[in-house]
Image: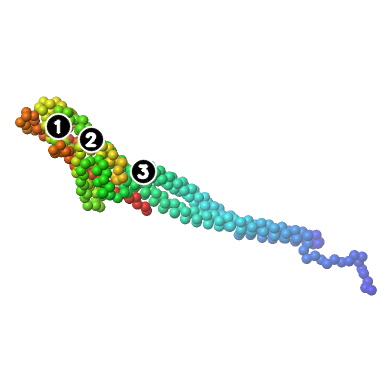
Amino acid sequence: MPSKLSFITPKRRKYLDLESKILIAFLIVTGCIIIAFAIFLSVQAFSKNSNIKSMQKEIAVMEAEIESYDFEYSQIKELQLKADEVYTANELLRGSIRNLFDLIPDQITLTKSIMEKDRLILYGVTPSKEVYNFMLLSPLKSIFHENRTTFYSLENGWYRFVSVNLLHNEEGLIQ
Amino acid sequence: MNPKEVKLIRLLVSVIVMIVILFMLFIFMAIPSVNYYKKENSRYLEVKAKYDAIKNTHQDSLNRLLDIKKNNKRVIESFANNFDEELFVRYLHSKFDDVKIVKSEEIAEEKFLRYKITVSTSMQTPMRFYEFLNDINHYSNILEVEFPIRFEMIEGTLFGSFDMKKYHYKIKTK
């Protein structure tokens, strides 16, 4: 039987002591946290990047659509203005015709009228020059800048007349 | 050196090594990731602000277009409608007795003007022409009555003639 010099049984020397184990564990945990954090940020940045790309595509589409909407809008606006212009011209013309009808007194009979932009030519029959001068020429004078009338006597004592009335402004009769 | 001192020095060296490793990890992994994220995030915010602004403008433009389309539906249709000569003659017959129209060739050089129309009519009273002018703005085409307007009484019948312009336009899309 071999002689034993010690009362305790020798233990094998540990490769890593407790402090080293704690340090290594701490190193692994902290390293993992740093790596996870870096990966997390990279994934977030990648997601932002793909969002940016999709937004840029949508921006390009929306910009093209805005251009198309504005183009269509400007055309409709132009149509609206043109239609207003036409409708107003028709309304003003209606007013001018109405005024012409109101202008002719019962005693005077018109046989022909020509309305142009800047002139009104009336052909008709009047019982006397005075009736014409008082009842038709006076209102015509208040509208037109120049009035010229030619009378032709008829067998029954009445007069046939031709009245040429001119406007010198650009708006003309439709004013 | 006694074993305790050796242990302490070993521990110290281990801590320093650990700190160096962590520092390197931080420098070469965490900081570039943070910088990349910050850069992408600031670019994202910039693009997002532009995206939101354009989205608002897009919505405003669309609303503005829908509004004007809704308010001018009749005008748009009237401009786009083709001129139906037969229909127009029928319409004129509802106002006048005899009707004759002469339509010009299609005018291509002007933006809106498509035809010039000369209308010759006969009527009982000039008030019919007045009524015609009253209703023409409600016709299915955009028509403008023009000078010269002639009226002549021949053997108890009033003859009238006048010119008209027919405007035409179809909305184009880009």
Q: Quadrant of the N terminus of chain A?
A: bottom right
The spot of residue B14 in percent (x, y) is: 72, 60
Q: Which residue is mark 2?
A: B127
The spot of residue A35 in percent (x, y) is: 64, 59
Up/down of B32 relative to B120, above or below: below
Q: What element does badge 2 sit on?
A: helix
Q: A155 or A96, which lies in front?
A: A155
**Chain for disc number 1:** A
Up/down of A41 relative to B59, above or below: below
Residue B27 in sight: no
The lab-note entry on whether marks 1 and 2 share a chain reads no
User: Quadrant of residue A147 in the image?
Assistant: top left
Q: Which residue is mark 1?
A: A109
User: How many C-alpha atoms fall within 10 Å of the one at disc 3: few (<14), some, or many (≥20)?
Assistant: some
Q: Which residue is mark 3?
A: B72
Q: Is residue A132 left or right of residue B91?
A: left
Which amino acid, mark 2? Met
The spot of residue B47 in percent (x, y) is: 49, 51
Q: What element does badge 3 sit on?
A: loop
Which amino acid, mark 1? Thr
Q: Residue at x 13, y 38 (%)?
A: B155
The lab-note entry on whether marks 3 and 2 share a chain reads yes
